Image: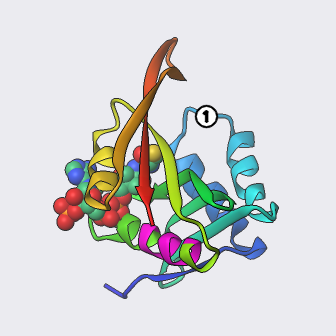
Amino acid sequence: MTQPVFSHMLGQHKSDIIRLYAETYPEKDVKKAELCADLIDVPTIAGLSGYVGCKLAGFILAQQVCPSSDIIELIVAPSFRRIGIAAGLLDALVALSQSRNISELFLEVAEDNEAAQALYLTCGFQNVGKRNRYYQRDGHSIDAIIMQKSL
Ligand SMILES: CC(C)(COP(=O)(O)OP(=O)(O)OC[C@H]1O[C@@H](n2cnc3c(N)ncnc32)[C@H](O)[C@@H]1OP(=O)(O)O)[C@@H](O)C(=O)NCCC(=O)NCCS
């Protein structure tokens, strides 16, 4: 397989972001996918993509307000999972954050999202708290685990 290329996301990538978001969360309104893609226009948002050839394999979005950064979206396409795309995106975000004097990364992850929790623990994040009933899903609520990584 061609090696993934990690780089900054630009306006031309929006349609790929919308497609991947909608594929990952088919239960959500397509407007959410469009809102997600529009975030790359926000000055305080860092957006990084991982392309394999001309296919968007994954992307990450983080709000960056020095000295901390909050990861607000991370998605890898099912056909590109478990080959290190998310870990590569997190490494690229760490490098970008360090170049901007950011010293801490934070994120929220659903308590039942074992794949993402395993990823973040592997990448050096630790559990630092919980937000009760943070996510609403199918008429019930799920707690979020707050994770942090010092840079
Ligand atoms: C979670 C997600 C981003 C992981 O992406 P990925 O590119 O497959 O992850 P990587 O290949 O970089 O995995 C790196 C390590 O994380 C851990 N990991 C990743 N996915 C895992 C899984 N399904 N089960 C257990 N461990 C997992 C492993 O330690 C893995 O290393 P290994 O493959 O050598 O064992 C992806 O499954 C995804 O997009 N899920 C849907 C959206 C989502 O949940 N996003 C996170 C919201 S907080």
The residue depicted at 71 percent of the width and 61 percent of the height is 45
**Pick the front one: 93 or 31:** 93
Quarter of the view holding residue 146:
top left
Q: On the image, numbered disc 1 is attached to which residue?
A: 28
Q: Is the residue 98 above or below the residue 19 in the image?
A: below
Ligand 1, seen in the image, is in the quarter at bottom left
In the image, residue 96 lies in the stretch drawn in magenta:
yes
In the image, residue 95 lies in the stretch drawn in magenta:
yes
What's the residue type where badge 1 is placed?
Lys
53 sits left or right of 63 in the view? left
Q: Is residue 81 visible?
A: no
Instruction: Please name the predominant secondary structure of the magenta segment in the image.
Output: helix
The residue depicted at 59 percent of the width and 66 percent of the height is 102
36 sits left or right of 107 in the view? right
Q: Is residue 20 visible?
A: yes
Q: Is the residue 91 above or below the residue 42 in the image?
A: below
Residue 141, percent across and down? 48, 16
Task: Pick the quarter of the image with the C terminus.
Answer: bottom left
| Region rendered in magenta | 90-97
**Pick the front one: 17 or 128:** 128
Q: Is the residue 51 above or below the residue 29 in the image?
A: below
Count of all numbered marks drawn on residues in the image? 1
Residue 59, percent across and down? 54, 64
Residue 1, percent across and down? 31, 84
136 sits left or right of 79 in the view? right
Residue 5, percent across and down? 48, 84
Q: Residue furthest bottom?
A: 2
Q: Residues within 10 Å of mark 1 (few under 14, many from 20)?
A: few
